[in-house]
Image: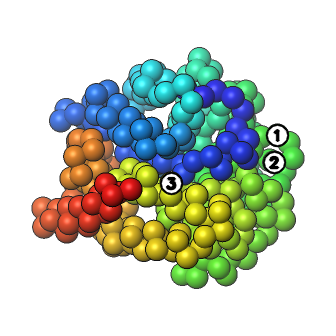
């Protein structure tokens, strides 16, 4: 596992995969199926893994967190950067800080807590977490205005910010005043587009963000990585063609549920058996499985031609 401090060059080296966390039928974390997922991504050239919402770390048991981290350390290749998430509750993330001290992950992502929180409290919590764990954090911006640009600037200048995952949904992503203001306070090469392939072209080209995260990369990693390389080479037309190839599965994720559809897609593709989705999320209704399998099959067929 890669343990060096994270640089802008490191962020730009790969699409940042956000994979599901496979569990067995008893709900236990399944080492063999997670290994299959990791190897599938690594063999396609993906070198950065972020375990957060798609892994349902919002609901991970405190008693299994250390086992989860140990598994990631043991399974990741030497050149693979792995970022686990913490939180979203303050008490949870502070207990997780104590566990993380025993591992060499260069950063961790703080899951966003919208309820029972405010900006001053969030900043204080991040500062206390960083002080406890002794390393900077990834800030996950999922809600509009969750942290002000000036607060993000303070975290950056104080050395507490590793990078930002920007995932505020806009109907027209090219018109994003919040992101524009953030870029006045934090360098663009430390901000990653956080919503998959669909807004990535706008985010990288118009706003200069450094890379993008993706869930569907878990189905088509070579295709997703090819899109990033085309953007970096200035081939926007080629990147747009690839973006459209991800659109059908992404639209299903948006219409049904982004996490549960991705879990099912990875299983349907035969990449890894992700097992049951962890409560408090429910399983997909049976009448949705065929359309997810069809969209996944189309994307996988394109991937296999890469």
Determine if residue 169 is in view: no
Say which residue label 2 marks: 156
Give the numbered dot on residue 225.
3
Extreme residue toward the top, this view? 102
Mark 1 is surrounded, within 10 Å at the Cα level, by few (under 14), some (14 to 19) or many (20 or more) other residues, namely few
Across and down, in percent, residue 119 comes to: 71, 56
Q: Earlier in the sequence, mark 3 or mark 2?
A: 2
- Relative side of 228 to 25, left or right: right
Q: Residue at x 54, y 51 (%)?
A: 15
Mark 3 is surrounded, within 10 Å at the Cα level, by few (under 14), some (14 to 19) or many (20 or more) other residues, namely many
Q: Nearer the viewer, residue 246 or 157?
A: 246
Across and down, in percent, residue 208 comes to: 72, 65
Spatial CA distance of label 2 from label 1 is 5 Å
- Relative side of 31 to 102, left or right: left
Q: Secondary structure at mark 2?
A: helix
Q: Secondary structure at mark 1?
A: loop
Q: Earlier in the sequence, mark 3 or mark 1?
A: 1
Determine if residue 218 is in view: yes
Spatial CA distance of label 3 from label 2 is 28 Å
Q: Residue at x 45, y 68 (%)?
A: 242
Say which residue label 1 marks: 159
Q: Residue at x 46, y 74 (%)?
A: 241
Across and down, in percent, residue 143 comes to: 59, 64
In the rendered structure, are the residues bearing label 2 and label 1 in contact, judged by CB atoms less than 8 Å apart? Answer: yes
Q: Nearer the viewer, residue 122 or 150?
A: 150
Give the numbered dot on residue 196.
none
User: Is residue 102 depicted above or below 119 in this figure?
Assistant: above
């Amino acid at each position: 596992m890669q343990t060096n401090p994270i640089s802008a060059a490191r962020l730009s080296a790969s699409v940042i995969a956000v994979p599901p966390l496979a569990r067995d039928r008893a709900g236990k974390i399944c080492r063999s199926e997670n290994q299959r997922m990791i190897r599938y991504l690594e063999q396609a050239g993906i070198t950065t893994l972020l375990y957060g919402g798609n892994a349902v770390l919002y609901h991970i048991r405190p008693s299994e967190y250390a086992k989860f981290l140990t598994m990631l350390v043991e399974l990741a290749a030497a050149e693979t950067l792995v970022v686990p998430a913490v939180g979203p509750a303050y008490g949870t993330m502070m207990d997780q800080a104590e566990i993380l001290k025993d591992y060499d992950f260069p950063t961790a992502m703080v899951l966003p807590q919208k309820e029972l929180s405010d900006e001053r409290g969030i900043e204080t919590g991040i500062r206390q977490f960083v002080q406890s764990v002794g390393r900077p954090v990834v800030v996950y911006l999922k809600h509009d205005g969750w942290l002000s640009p000036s607060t993000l600037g303070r975290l950056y200048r104080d050395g507490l910010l590793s990078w930002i995952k920007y995932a505020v949904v806009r109907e027209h992503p090219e018109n994003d005043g919040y992101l524009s203001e953030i870029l006045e306070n934090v360098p663009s090469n430390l901000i990653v587009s956080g919503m998959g392939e669909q807004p990535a072209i706008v985010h990288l080209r118009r706003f200069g963000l450094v890379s993008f995260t993706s869930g569907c990369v878990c189905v088509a990693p070579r295709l997703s990585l090819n899109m990033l390389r085309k953007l970096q080479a200035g081939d926007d037309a080629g990147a747009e063609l690839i973006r459209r190839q991800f659109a059908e599965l992404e639209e299903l994720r948006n219409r049904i549920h982004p996490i549960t559809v991705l879990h099912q897609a990875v299983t349907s593709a035969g990449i890894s058996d992700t097992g049951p989705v962890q409560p408090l999320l429910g399983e997909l209704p049976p009448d949705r499985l065929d359309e997810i399998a069809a969209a996944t099959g189309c994307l996988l067929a394109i991937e296999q031609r890469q």
